[in-house]
Image: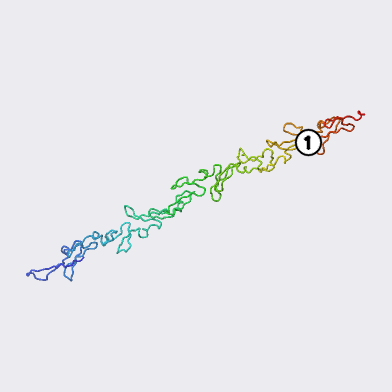
Amino acid sequence: MQSDAPVKLVITTLKHCHGISIIPDGCTFNNGGCDLNAVCSLNATINGIKCTCRPGYTNTGRGVKVICTDSCTVNNGGDDPNAICARDPRTNAVTCNCKVGFTNTCSAVKVVCKDSCSIKNGGCDSNAICSHDAMTNAVICTCKAGYTNNGSVANVVCKDSCTVNNGGCGSNAICSHKAMTNAVSCTCKAGYTNTGSVVNVVCKDSCTVNNGDCDPKASCSHNAASNAVICTCKAGYTNAGSAMNVVCKDSCSLNNGGCDSNATCSHDVATNAVKCICKTGYTNTGSGVKVVCKDSCTVNNGGCDPNANCSHNATTNAVKCTCKSGYTNTGSGVRVVCRDKCTLNNGGCVSNAVCSHNAATDAVNCACRAGYVNAGSASRMNCTSTVSMS
């Protein structure tokens, strides 16, 4: 720095001294009166001394008084308030370096320090939030909601969380993002149920959790293509609801379990499967598992003797076998065996009579043999030899 007024040095010589007057350099004495941190020089124009503050120092004096003060202590060396003032170790010139958390947006000569987070997001990933350390003010990069740091603490690389370990969701969950916050949302896949909580989703096979919400009388399984829960009524039960809402009822209570109207619906003791049994007086004419119940009297005469008439007991509807006219039951118990009455005790005819059947009714017809005549009545025959009557 230069003072406004030159300093004059006047040298007088004694009259008795002879020779040339010697005028010494004024800067050689006490730095010319300049500040210790100033450079003293001679100004030929004004024939005076000029004091100039050295690099790294600023004149804080007034008027002609040059006072050199460390520039860094004067208005931060002219630096930005968010810069640190220092000196070049070689030249001692002021150097400005932005503080931690700030970035120079101008040049090396003109330092302008801006919040680093306001410049290219502080160098953070585009999917990160830039902030500052509370203690050091250093830039901190924190991945936004829904993103995970796939780099390191010093080099934060934010990836979609769903692409990194499925976003922390279980292997049986689908990772997605919430519409409002973009936070990770874990949703159990089809066929799985969350047994954890909203924030800690644990996906279990739905069939192991409350039978997959199927009816207690249904079996829970999964669709081969979609893995969605399928509810299938167990043996002996029928879906009385819909495909989406399976309600299992005892099959016998629905349309007689699919049995013939003349059959009784029941269940197999071992498997509980529907069992169709023809009612009394009916016979199964179906095949395999298909039971078709027909009036037993229309099927092989109800098992009656060919010479018997098949009918039904008025109370139980059981088959009733009754020997036809002209035939007699020679069986025992419930077994009816019909024999031609004429073969049994001559059909009840007298000894000299011939037993035969009425052509229309098949009833027993008794007629006296040749050589005999009925000496009785039609209802009480008495066949008498015609020879004995002559």
Specify whether 353 is left or right of 323. Answer: right
Q: Looking at the image, which is closer to me, 193 or 124?
A: 193
Instruction: Give percent across and percent down for residue 228.
Output: 53, 49
Image location of residue 319, percent across then percent down: 71, 37
Q: Is residue 140 left or right of residue 388?
A: left
Find the residue positioned furthest to the right. Answer: 390
> Where on the picture, by quarter, is residue 179?
bottom left
The quarter in which the C terminus is drawn is top right
Q: Is residue 225 left or right of residue 159?
A: right
Q: Relative to 184, say whether 27 is above or below.
A: below
**Residue in the image at 78% along x and 36% along y:** 325
Question: How many numbered markers are drawn?
Answer: 1
Q: Quadrant of the N terminus?
A: bottom left
Occupied quadrant, residue 66: bottom left
Label 1 is placed on what type of residue?
A: Ser
Above or below for 122 versus 306: below
Coloring applied to the structure:
rainbow
| Residue extending farthest top | 388
Q: Residue furthest front?
A: 377
Q: Secondary structure at mark 1?
A: loop
Which residue position is annotated with label 1? 325
Mark 1 crowdedness (10 Å alpha carbons): few <14, some 14-19, many ≥20:
some
Query: Residue 55 location in percent, x, y?
Result: 24, 63
**Front residue of this view, candidates 50 and 309:** 309
Where is residue 284? Give x, y as percent: 68, 41
Q: Nearer the viewer, residue 120 or 49?
A: 120
Q: Nearer the viewer, residue 369 or 120?
A: 369
